[in-house]
Image: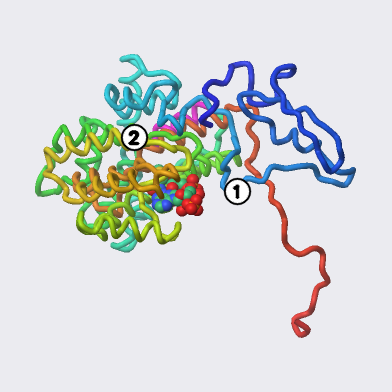
Amino acid sequence: MGTVETIKADESAAGSSEGRDALSVVDRRTGKSYELPIANGTIRAMDLRQIKTGADDFGLMAYDPGFLNTAACTSRITFIDGDKGILRYRGYPIEVLAEKCTYLEVAYLLLHGELPDQKQYEKFVHDITYHTMIHESLKKIMDAFNYDAHPMGMLISMIAAMSTFYPEAHNVHDPKVRIKQIHRLIAKMPTIAAFAYRHSIGLPYMYPSNDLSYSENFLTMLFTTPAEHFKPNPTLVRALDVLFILHADHEQNCGTNAMRSIGSAHTDPYSSVAGAAAALYGPLHGGANEEVLKMLEQVGSISRVPAFIKEVKEGKGEKRLMGFGHRVYKNFDPRAKIIKRMAEEVFEVTGRNPLLDIALELERIALQDDYFVKRKLYPNVDFYSGLIYEALGIPSAAFTVLFAIPRTAGWLAQWEELLEDPENKIARPRQVYLGPGDRPFVPMNKR
Ligand code: ACO
């Protein structure tokens, strides 16, 4: 909801602002007029229902495939102004958080609404750190996957499986139970992700180390072998932490919408996060970073960039410039700007990835091309993130997993907000039925 910056504490969403703004509607079918209250830049869809042609009419609905213009909830977590390229968590600009905070500080902010003081931070870090181990039986489930199973498939299954290990999690109405599961999920995501990676390359699982930071622990679990301890470079640890901050939340995107939709049925948080991660897996969503790398490899050289751009334009939507375009941002994605700058710092340590030059050239040409300019297609968060993941030594199939780890904090913050929202109802959209009307059944031998 880019146009609504603040929601007054005593108002829920539209509908509580009698006597203030209103929308006058005339139904040309009946000649009747209606006054629909406007609050926070919205009308209530249910206010349309009174607009009927007669007693048998169900009432007017809004048709909005893909939710292009439908606010499904109020939220106080993340603000985006897509036209200006602004992203804030709980009021703090993403640029400031990326510069000054750790990922766990930001996760606390998303969950609790305020940045932690020193004591709160230390307790939160402790609570996360001491939940990083996973049940040994989960390891056996991991072992059952084929060696070439996609890391996202393993991650989604493992998260869903966790709900069977913590049956108390079904009690979603108890805030104390909820916070315990929140800590578990944030803590165990890197462990599961690292185990999935180790499984795919046939290395033994590395257990978490409580003396390491969240991001350092993750990199260590990925790359330490029984024969050799891996000590990640501090620049790379910080780069990963910043990437985690940038991916932590993004208001009502496809994955978060899945989280809220599943959560609205009062499903336990593990099953809900598994569903949200499944949405993230899609190539139009968090799967795009993997696709960007494939695309850059396919382009292969700077000289082939113009031909590739031409193919995208001629593909008329069939072939897309992956990592470009966004439902909400019609300007630079502020996260892409931070990542682009960070890529240079990372490459100073790891050596320059030649694919970066292809990406820079794709961006340069696309931003001058009428096709992309007219459609306001700019680089999104996924355009440069894959290049950094690759520089960190992470295979492209695991990129979306690196998105899912930090987004877990956002999903859970949104889930908490949903469960505390007095207006929360089970998500159940309407449809416009266009199929056949009542018709007689024809037995099989007469069809
Ligand atoms: N390359 C080429 N053309 C594009 C691209 C692209 N990346 N994105 C959109 N377009 C074109 C469409 O073909 C369409 O053109 P038309 O008006 O001539 O039909 C127009 O721009 C609008 O596109 P829509 O698909 O209607 O825009 P929507 O808001 O539904 O989609 C999306 C947004 C899914 C992100 C889209 O831009 C896309 O597919 N991008 C590539 C995949 C990607 O990078 N996804 C990651 C998004 S960020 C994230 O989820 C974390």
In magenta segment, residue 170: no
Label 1 close to label 2 by CB (< 8 Å): no
Going 65% across and 44% down the picture, which residue do you hit? 428
Label 2 environment density (alpha carbons within 10 Å; few <14, some 14–19, many ≥20) = many
Q: Quadrant of residue 217?
A: top left
Left or right of 61, for residue 71: left
Q: Position of residue 180 (x, y in %)?
A: 44, 31
Label 1 environment density (alpha carbons within 10 Å; few <14, some 14–19, many ≥20) = few
Going 59% across and 16% down the picture, which residue do you hit? 9
Report the front residue among 104 and 271: 104
Report helix, strand or loop for mark 1.
helix
Report the front residue among 124 and 332: 332
Can you say whether 56 is above or below 71 in the image? below
Is any part of residue 87 visible from this angle?
yes
Going 49% across and 26% down the picture, which residue do you hit? 176
Report helix, strand or loop for mark 2.
helix
Q: Position of residue 140 (x, y in %)?
A: 34, 55
Q: Position of residue 250 (x, y in %)?
A: 44, 35
| Residue under pointer 1 | 65
| Residue under pointer 2 | 335
The numbered mark at residue 249 is none
Q: Is mark 1 within 8 Å of ligand 1?
A: no
Highlighted range, magenta: 175-186
Q: Quadrant of the C terminus?
A: bottom right
Is any part of residue 164 visible from this angle?
no
